[in-house]
Image (cartoon, rainbow, N blue to C red):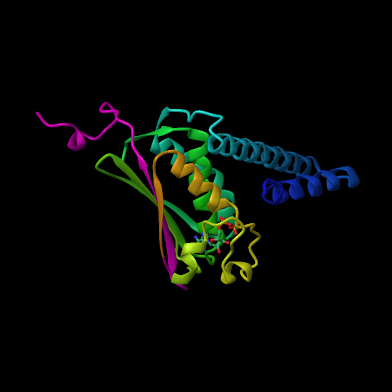
């Protein structure tokens, strides 16, 4: 399962390093390629770590980390990582209201989940559309949603998309490379954090994935209106 998902960064690293060895390149081009190798190796390392952690958590061999971190910071880091992909497809990435509550858990794993929803939204959307991320608190939970104006999914397909290797027909014919693994990992991560993932979608119109996670408590960073009143 891991090897399927690792193929895309590995292919980029192999191809780029091969070109660098074979041709005389300008300094600028060399630098650009070295940067690509560097960022793809980092993506690969993060991916391996995430898969190992999820396996260990599922086997009960690892305790879940309980870092407390601002949802905004995690969202911002993921937006930054997704931006090159969105730019290439001329898709606008927009952060709507992000309520200033902290999240509690394993930051690396949660960023993997958020990043995965963002890259899927970009992958399965046509150019010149918008992907919007938002987060709002409801009771003790934080609802983090990623909405797109993309290809959407048929109602009957929705129950399958969290299964390993499942891809919709539209995704298969979209020309976007995928393995059908990402969402199954996202669901496991969210479940390990005591949360859940919801999805709504209209074929041809777009989809909205919402991860609902227990939020931390940090009155000092919470908005005045949300603080306990005296
Ligand atoms: P993949 O590697 O195929 O993107 P995922 O596990 O991340 O795998 O997603 C499973 C399937 O769910 C995708 O192949 C696609 O059919 C569907 N899907 C996920 N996100 C979206 C989205 N934002 N819009 C439309 N379809 C989506």
Placement of 160 over or under 54, stated as above or below: below
Number of labels in the image equals 0
- Please state the horizontal and vertical placement of residue 166, each as a whole percent of the image: 59, 61
Q: Quadrant of residue 124?
A: bottom right
Segment tinted magenta in the rendering: 201-230
- Please state the horizontal and vertical placement of residue 138, each as a whole percent of the image: 26, 45
Is 54 left, or right, of 101 in this rendering? right
Name the residue rendered at 29%, 28% in the picture.
218
**Residue 7 visible in the picture:** yes
Placement of 64 over or under 22, stated as above or below: above
Name the residue rendered at 43%, 32% in the picture.
105
Decide whether residue 11 is among the magenta residues: no
**Residue 79 visible in the picture:** no
From this viewpoint, which residue is outermost toward the front? 59
Q: Quadrant of ligand 1?
A: bottom right
Name the residue rendered at 57%, 60% in the picture.
123
Placement of 25 over or under 53, stated as above or below: below
Is 211 left, or right, of 119 in this rendering? left
From this viewpoint, which residue is outermost toward the right? 22
Is 107 left, or right, of 227 in this rendering? right
Is 88 left, or right, of 14 in this rendering? left
Decide whether residue 210 is among the magenta residues: yes
User: In the image shown, does 29 or 224 lie closer to the viewer?
Assistant: 224
User: In the image shown, does 177 or 22 lie closer to the viewer?
Assistant: 177
- Please state the horizontal and vertical placement of residue 174, each as a whole percent of the image: 61, 69
Q: Quadrant of residue 141?
A: top left
Name the residue rendered at 59%, 71% in the picture.
169
């Amino acid at each position: 399962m891991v090897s399927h998902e690792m193929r895309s960064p590995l292919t980029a690293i192999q191809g780029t390093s091969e070109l660098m060895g074979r041709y005389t390149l300008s300094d600028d081009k060399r630098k650009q390629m070295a940067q690509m190798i560097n960022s793809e190796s980092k993506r690969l390392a993060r991916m391996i770590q995430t898969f190992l952690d999820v396996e260990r958590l599922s086997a009960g061999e690892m305790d879940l980390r309980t870092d407390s971190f601002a949802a905004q910071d995690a969202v911002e880091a993921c937006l930054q990582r997704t931006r090159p992909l969105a730019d290439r497809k001329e898709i606008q990435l927009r952060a709507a209201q992000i309520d200033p509550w902290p999240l509690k858990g394993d930051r690396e794993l949660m960023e993997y989940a958020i990043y995965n929803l963002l890259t899927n939204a970009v992958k399965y959307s046509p150019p010149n559309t918008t992907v919007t991320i938002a987060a709002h608190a409801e009771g003790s939970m934080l609802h983090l949603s990623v909405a797109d104006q993309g290809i959407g999914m048929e109602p009957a397909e929705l129950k399958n998309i969290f299964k390993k290797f499942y891809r919709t027909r539209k995704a298969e014919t979209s020309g976007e490379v995928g393995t059908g693994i990402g969402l199954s990992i996202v669901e496991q991560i969210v479940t390990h954090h005591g949360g859940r993932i919801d999805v709504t979608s209209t074929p041809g119109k777009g989809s909205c994935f919402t991860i609902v996670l227990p939020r931390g408590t940090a009155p000092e960073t919470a908005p005045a209106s949300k603080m306990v009143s005296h």
